[in-house]
Amino acid sequence: MDARKKEIERLDADLRRLEHQITADCVDIGRRAAAAAPTAVNTEELAKYLNSAVTLQNSISGFHGDIDRIRSLVQSLAALQKECDDAVGRRDQILRERQTRFLELGAGAFALFRKVPDGAAYRPLFEELVKIDQEVDERHQELQRLQEEEQSKGFFDKIKLKAKKVMVRGEISRLDRAKAVAYENAGAKIADTDFSRHADGPLRELFGSIRDRKAAADAIILENARRQAEMENQRLELQRLEAVDRAEERVRDLERRIESLGKELEVIHCWTGQLFLDRDIRHEIQDEVLSSKIDSVLAQREAIRQKRQAIDRLKAEGEMEELLRKEKERRARRKQLEEEMRVKERQIGTIDIEINVGLRRIDELKRVISGDAAYVDAPPLPPLPDLYPPTEPPPPKT
């Protein structure tokens, strides 16, 4: 029995393996048929399955395309944003370098302004410097006057004059600082004018350097504007793909839909494969690989049928063997019960004899009591039959 059970388990495992293999092969047959199918087939059910497979596959391909596009757009946006940030950093650096030259440019241009014949046209640009220069001259004149006056004064008056001189020098220092700021402001203003046509040598080169830096900074602004426009277009495309600010979440949603559609497509392929097996419509699609796969699955189906027959035979043999064993045990038990019944019947007969003997003795004793008879001892019982004759032992259990 154990050997038969093990054989059934082995055959059952083979059955499950073959069934899984047939299912996988049916999917392969359906997939192969969908790939090799002509534009039209005669079998209506096959046409329905093939159209469903095409629709599902197109949807899956479209979702894959959306995922690739979303990831591409996200990477492109990140790259463009980094380029913009880097460009802004370069522009700021260029403008800082340009600004550091304004002081030198303002000083050189102001000195040249005093020499050019038509300098009046640029006077508004240098008005602050002209005013500061005038104030500086006045303070220097005042300081000169105080120094001359100090020569002719006494000790206490000199102390007062020295204090005034300190205040004037402080004012001159303040004006010098204000003049440096004014030089820088004037340089920033004059850099965008045509004043450079009056310059030559190092000053003209300085104008050119500052102008080049301005052009480089403006070019960066234009390039960043182009990048921003491109980024806006890409954000609009992400919005169309429902992935703005949620690209990874949208990709996961699409992947789940692809997985679901993939399962549906696999079911359609399996149904298509089963249709080829059940109705043998391989003439619809002329493909040697497909025909060979169908023959292979049909052979597997035959192997499954044979293994199921073998399992059924083994189960029937095992069940019949068990029934025969139980039938033999029941017969032995029946024979045993019959023998026990015969013993009981003999026991009942013996008891009946003892009862009758006892009743006759009671009648004799009643006559003794009434004086009709003399008392005598009761006679012994007659010999009784053997209640438990030897029986054959029951057959051993198998």
Image (tube, helix red, strand yellow):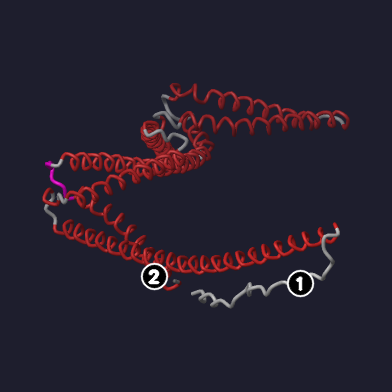
Task: Please report the residue visible at 73 percent of the width from the left and 29 percent of the height from the top.
Answer: 168
Q: Is residue 204 visible?
A: no
- Identified by mark 2, the residue type is Glu
Task: Please report the residue visible at 56 percent of the width from the left and 27 percent of the height from the top.
Answer: 129
State which region is magenta. Answer: 36-42
- 397 displayed left or right of 368: left
Q: Which residue is mark 1?
A: 379
Task: Please report the residue visible at 64 percent of the width from the left and 33 percent of the height from the top.
Answer: 177
Name the main secondary structure of what is drawn in magenta.
Answer: loop
Looking at the picture, how far across and down is residue 260, in whole percent?
38, 43
Q: Relative to residue 321, is residue 88 depicted above or below?
A: above
Quarter where residue 251 is shown: top left
Give how far apart the Cα atoms at labels 1 and 2 are. 74 Å
Looking at the picture, how far across and down is residue 11, in whole percent?
36, 66
Total tally of numbered discs in the picture: 2
Position of the N terminus by quadrant: bottom left
Looking at the picture, how far across and down is residue 257, in whole percent?
38, 40
Q: Relative to residue 297, is residue 254 depicted above or below?
A: above
Q: Is residue 234 visible?
A: yes
Q: Which residue is mark 2?
A: 7
Which class describes the residues within 10 Å of circle 1: few (<14), some (14-19), or many (20+)? few
Secondary element at tag 2? helix
Q: Relative to residue 39, is residue 20 depicted above or below?
A: below
Between residue 72 and residue 253, name the one nearer to us.
253
- Identified by mark 1, the residue type is Pro
The verdict on residue 369 being magenta is no
Q: Nearer the viewer, mark 1 or mark 2?
A: 1
Query: Are circles 1 and 2 on residues that touch, CB within 8 Å?
Result: no
Between residue 294 and residue 172, name the one nearer to us.
294
